[in-house]
Amino acid sequence: MSENKEHWVLTFICPDRPGIVHAISGAVVQAGGNITESQQYTSEDTGRFFMRLQIEADITKADFEKRFESIALDYQMEYVLDFVGRNMKTLVLVSKAGHALNDLMFRQRSGSLPIEISKVFGNHPDLAPLAEFFGVDFEHHAISNDSEKLAFENKLREYITTNNIELIVLARYMQILSPEFCDEFRGRIINIHHSFLPGFKGANPYAQAHARGVKLIGATAHFVTKDLDEGPIIEQNVTRVEHSDSKSHLVEIGQDAESKTLTQAVKWFSEHRVLLDGQRTIIFR
């Protein structure tokens, strides 16, 4: 890509009908642009069309968006136009377990994860030293009753609005968000949990799994909704285990799966590769 060109990612959802791809391609050509990546999908269940494009062009993003607006209106598109590789402003919520947070912050620092973690909020102070190590602000808010939860969520709302936060990540955050908060930020909150749900709930799920002789351990990353752990799934991973694996080894395997799965989901989201189709997701890898 030449230095004077801009590179964007365009994603959109609209009712499926003939002429969509032709209209988009024509707009790119008229802008003197070039499509560097293209993926599309039509949902037979909902009758909607999904597309993700990466576009290189000499004109500015604002100028292209002005030209594209008439097409978006004509085809009833919900669309996002962004710069390729721009770091997405992200907020992370944690409790005591640090494996998922550590992986996110390490990959952010190494440049392999296009996010900008502006702050970490915790309902316990345990992970403050980890955030400090990576140079990320940490703020502790104890939550022991509904009043404190409401005050904390109001604090989050204020911070999200003031700092233009685009993504909220629950990195083993062991509190339930209110239905109102989930609805307000629908499609922008990603959670991770182990694969044992709903089979082994509550404390020590790995001990319960070990006692039952499970053969598979995994993790699920999903969007958060007011229905606990039932939001649209973004990514899942699984690892086979043996009867000889100790409880502590199962925990290690599970935490590795959780970290890997959450980071992958965040990466896809921050690269605009995740689109919602009702209760499921379309992933353009």
Image (cartoon, rainbow, N blue to C red):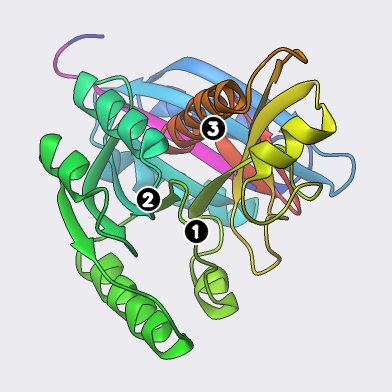
Q: Secondary structure at mark 1?
A: loop
Q: Please state which amino acid type lies under the numbered disc 1.
A: Met
Q: Are marks 1 and 2 in contact (CB under 8 Å)?
A: yes
Relative to 135, say whether 168 is above or below: below
Q: Which residue is denoted by mark 1 in the rendering?
A: 174
10 Å crowding of disc 2: few (<14), some (14-19), many (20+): some
Relative to 239, say whether 199 is above or below: below
Image location of residue 148, percent across then percent down: 37, 84
Q: Which residue is denoted by mark 3 in the rendering?
A: 258
Q: Residue sitting at 68 percent across and 54 percent down?
A: 231
Q: Which residues are magenta?
A: 3-12
Q: Residue sitting at 69 percent across and 49 percent down?
A: 232
Q: Which residue is denoted by mark 2 in the rendering?
A: 96
Image location of residue 42, percent across then percent down: 78, 34
Q: Are marks 1 and 3 in contact (CB under 8 Å)?
A: no
Residue 140 seen in the figure: yes
Q: Using the rendered view, name the quadrant where residue 107 is placed.
A: top left
The quadrant of the image that shows the C terminus is top right
Cα separation between marks 1 and 2: 8 Å
Left or right: where 117 falls relative to 205: left
10 Å crowding of disc 3: few (<14), some (14-19), many (20+): many
Does the segment drawn in magenta span residue 207?
no
Image location of residue 235, percent across then percent down: 63, 32
Q: Please state which amino acid type lies under the numbered disc 2.
A: Lys
Relative to 152, say whether 167 is above or below: above
Q: Using the rendered view, name the quadrant where residue 98 is placed.
A: top left
Cα separation between marks 1 and 3: 14 Å
Q: Secondary structure at mark 2?
A: loop
Q: Earlier in the sequence, mark 2 or mark 3?
A: 2
Q: Earlier in the sequence, mark 1 or mark 2?
A: 2
Residue 50 seen in the figure: no
Q: Earlier in the sequence, mark 1 or mark 3?
A: 1
